[in-house]
Image: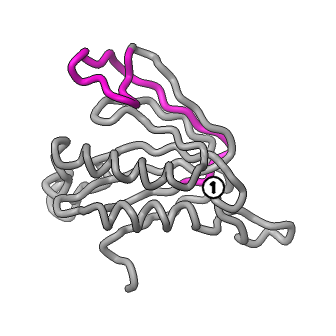
Amino acid sequence: MRAIVQRVSKASVTASYHATSNSLKPGAARSRGEQKSIGRGLVVLVGIEVGDTDDDAIYIADKVTNLRVFEDTEQKFHYSAKQLALDILIVSNFTLMAETRKGRRPSFSRAATSTLADPIFTNIVEKFAETKLNIVTGYFGQNMSLEIHNDGPVTILIDSRKRGL
């Protein structure tokens, strides 16, 4: 599992199209243009890979919420989103699993199918929610428009397969 973490002053996600009635679930878009937003905090783009488990979700949620990327008065990264009770916007993004070593067209063969990724994404959202922070999600499996006001900019890649290396 990969996560791109961006420190933001504010961010929003908007559904690009209407979801069918049988695909609606919590967090699903109900109409074109439905928007969700956060204030200061983190945007987390999550890519789920074939073979990822709930253990990967636990690792990413813990790492992100406790990642010290917010500055103290001396401009040092000293505080985490959890310590400051900041917002987190989580968006599923299978393109983080793109393989680009061969040719010019990215391959997504490492990305989990939506059938496999959906329950893992739901689990990672639940793990983030356990922190009691304000957690907002994108629209799983749908095209979305993101507006991100990157603060810094601070952008960090976390890969659950590379922990402890």
Give the vertical position of 107 relative to 146 (above or below). Answer: below
Is 98 or 87 nearer to us in this picture? 87
The residue beneath circle 1 is: 153
**67 horizontally vs 21: left or right:** right
Residue at horizontal 44 percent and vertical 30 percent from the top: 145
Give the vertical position of 145 relative to 79 (above or below). Answer: above
Q: Quarter holding the C terminus?
A: bottom left
Q: What x and y, as percent, mark residue 117?
A: 23, 48
Q: What x and y, as percent, mark residue 10?
A: 65, 39
Q: Is residue 69 magenta?
A: no
Q: Quadrant of residue 80?
A: bottom right
Give the vertical position of 15 relative to 83 (above or below). Answer: above
**Colouring scheme applied when the structure was drawn:** one colour
Is 7 or 123 nearer to us in this picture? 123
**143 horizontally vs 125: left or right:** left
**92 horizontally vs 7: left or right:** left
Q: Quarter holding the N terminus?
A: bottom left
**14 horizontally vs 121: left or right:** right
Residue at horizontal 27 percent and vertical 34 percent from the top: 141
Residue at horizontal 15 percent and vertical 62 percent from the top: 102
Query: Magenta part of the protein: which range?
Result: 6-30
Residue pushed farthest right?
A: 73
Is 81 or 72 nearer to us in this picture? 81
Q: Is residue 105 visible?
A: no
Q: Is residue 27 magenta?
A: yes
